[in-house]
């Protein structure tokens, strides 16, 4: 289910957001204790197969979230392994699975049509409005809060299409600033992962970095019509309760790994003294 109602409609949670965090921690742990098995093809397949139940369960009704879960699985196992050729074959398998996922629901093929014929397709209304917002923003935008497209013209302006509103209100300058902030965050995650005291902590950070980077990339690509429309929120910026709670939990894990690095360095300094 996409949503689970706790108290009628006043309090709901999105289980897929919980699934992302759980998958990151689970795969990081499994890969850290089976790292020797990841040196052969079947060992890699066995570990990746552990993520299949949640991915298959999600892909039936939510292809976009399944893409993120697949990306997290692929990158964590890839980083933990020292082999490259098995992953080339798996990319082909994932591509075939993605095509099958498109066929499961008719509306997904309509999104492909809208992507290819954005000017004329009846299903491309949202994308056209997003492009209008981006184009009207110019270099410095209309000013914070002065968007016209978010006033019922652009559906999901507060969520999936938030990047278009950023472009409209803050212009190219604001859009580049947001992209650079995400690049800085991902770079810091990479630094923490490279210096993590153990493989488990490093893989957790890699998983978080993959999720944030992939969601940001897809959100921007959808808003600019660089890929077919799919519902992926922009981390920390799009509206959402469950998403922001678990994203903050993930950043807390990253900071916990970072804190261990600092403590380890201080301990080594004290021992040398």
Image (cartoon, grey):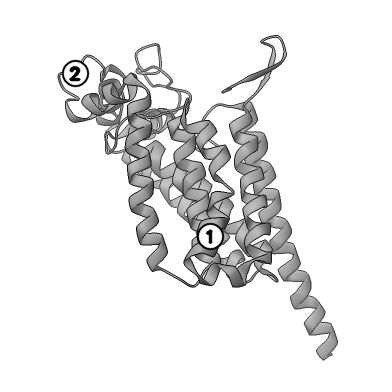
State whether residue 141 appears in this view: no
Locate residue 121, reporting x and y percent: 19, 18
How packed mark 2 is, by other alpha carbons closer than 10 Å (few <14, some 14-19, many 20 or more), is some
Q: Is residue 143 above or below residue 210?
A: above
Q: Residue furthest front?
A: 42
Q: Residue at x 38, y 34 (%)?
A: 170
What label does residue 121 carry, if any? 2
Of helix, strand and loop, which one carries label 2? loop
Image quarter (top left, top right, bottom left or bottom right) of the C terminus: bottom right
What label does residue 77 carry, if any? 1
Q: Is residue 164 above or below residue 73?
A: above
Q: Residue at x 69, y 56 (%)?
A: 255
Of helix, strand and loop, which one carries label 1? helix
Q: Residue at x 18, y 30 (%)?
A: 116
Q: Is residue 222 left or right of residue 145?
A: left
Q: Nearer the viewer, residue 241 or 41?
A: 41
Q: Is residue 124 left or right of residue 254?
A: left
Number of the front mark, 1 or 2: 1
How packed mark 1 is, by other alpha carbons closer than 10 Å (few <14, some 14-19, many 20 or more), is many
CA distance separating discs 1 and 2: 40 Å
């Amino acid at each position: 289910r996409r949503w689970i109602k706790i108290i009628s409609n006043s309090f709901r949670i999105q289980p897929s957001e919980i699934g992302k965090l759980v998958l990151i921690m689970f795969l990081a742990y499994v890969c850290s204790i089976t790292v020797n098995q990841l040196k052969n093809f079947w060992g890699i397949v066995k570990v990746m197969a552990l993520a299949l139940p949640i991915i298959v369960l999600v892909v039936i009704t939510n292809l976009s979230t399944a893409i993120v879960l697949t990306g997290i699985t692929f990158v964590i196992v890839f980083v933990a392994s020292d082999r490259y050729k098995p992953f080339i074959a798996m990319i082909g398998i994932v591509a075939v699975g993605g095509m099958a996922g498109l066929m499961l629901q008719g509306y997904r093929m309509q999104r492909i049509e809208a992507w290819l014929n954005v000017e004329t397709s009846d299903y491309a209304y949202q994308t056209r409005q997003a492009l209008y917002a981006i184009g009207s923003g110019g270099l410095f935008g209309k000013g914070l809060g002065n968007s016209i497209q978010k006033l019922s013209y652009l559906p999901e302006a507060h969520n999936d299409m938030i990047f278009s509103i950023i472009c409209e209100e803050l212009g190219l300058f604001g859009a580049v600033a947001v992209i650079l902030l995400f690049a800085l965050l991902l770079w810091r995650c990479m630094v923490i992962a490279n210096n993590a005291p153990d493989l488990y902590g490093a893989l957790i950070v890699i998983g978080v970095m993959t999720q944030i980077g992939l969601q940001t990339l897809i959100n921007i690509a959808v808003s600019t019509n660089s890929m077919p429309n799919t519902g992926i929120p922009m981390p920390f910026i799009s509206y959402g309760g469950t998403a922001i709670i678990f994203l903050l939990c993930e950043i807390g894990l990253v900071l916990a790994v970072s804190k261990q690095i600092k403590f380890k360095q201080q301990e080594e300094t004290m021992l040398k003294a």
